[in-house]
Amino acid sequence: NAGVTQTPKFQVLKTGQSMTLQCAQDMNHNSMYWYRQDPGMGLRLIYYSASEGTTDKGEVPNGYNVSRLNKREFSLRLESAAPSQTSVYFCASSQSQGADPRANVLTFGAGSRLTVL
Amino acid sequence: QKEVEQNSGPLSVPEGAIASLNCTYSDRGSQSFFWYRQYSGKSPELIMFIYSNGDKEDGRFTAQLNKASQYVSLLIRDSQPSDSATYLCAVNRNGGFKTIFGAGTRLFVKA
């Protein structure tokens, strides 16, 4: 099992360019997430998809859009990249949400390092 | 005040010692608490979770939860150099979709 697969692993953009980060999971998880990680800031939730067909804002959604293409795939789009979006992006998935904390355990992809010049 | 706070460290312990990592959270509605380990340049991976007050042990790792004090800790017994990593505390409201992470504590285990 591949788990959670993200592409690309590295990307350099110029200010104003657009790009899409792709994420796919093969664990039949219902929920998917996009986090960004900056030094000293920890992981911050950008957007999440509780289930196929739904998406919601997280802590830092400005400047991003997402698409839950199907149960397996969840993409993150930067329409007009800014230097403040230089970060490491992690896609994650979880079985679902509910009273059982095991359902909330996140499985992460390997990360995508994005630099915006 | 951050929702989840951790001492950024670095915390340095000798090999074989007990490493104690601490975390406080602000949302009293939080019900699930997670510890993830992240090696440099890698993605976070789950160590363990806890949701009841008290201690939970898994091998060399013990998670401790005190909801009244809004405090979670992770103890690593017999620390090994391979335990050197950043440890992330995370909290979640059961049934909620937002798992909130602390900034992490860097741990160095000296051989």
Image (spheres, rainbow, N blue to C red):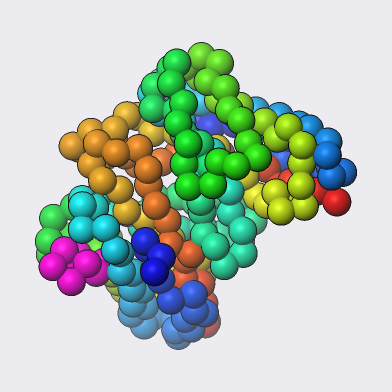
The residue closer to the viewer here, B1 or A38, is: B1
Image position of A91 with respect to A84: above or below: above
- Residue A8 sits in which quadrant? top right
The residue closer to the viewer here, B90 or A63, is: A63
Q: Is residue A19 magenta?
A: no
Taking the spot 78% from the left edge, 32% from the top edge, the residue there is: A18
Residue A111: image location, x then y, percent: 62, 44
Residue B47: image location, x then y, percent: 36, 54
B92 lies left or right of B14: left
| Residue with the most extreme front position | A62
Image position of B110 with respect to A107: above or below: below
Q: How many dots with numbers?
A: 0
- Residue A5 sits in which quadrant? top right
Image position of B71 with respect to A48: above or below: below
Taking the spot 71% from the left edge, 53% from the top edge, the residue there is: A84
Image position of A97 with respect to A28: above or below: below
Residue B105: image location, x then y, percent: 46, 71
In magenta, the rendered stretch is B64-72
Taking the spot 63% from the left edge, 36% from the top edge, the residue there is: A64
**Residue B42 appears anywhere in the view:** yes
Q: Is residue B68 magenta?
A: yes
Taking the spot 18% from the left edge, 37% from the top edge, the residue there is: A99
Residue B26: image location, x then y, percent: 29, 63
Image quadrant in which the N terminus of chain B is located: bottom left
**Residue A115 appears anywhere in the view:** no
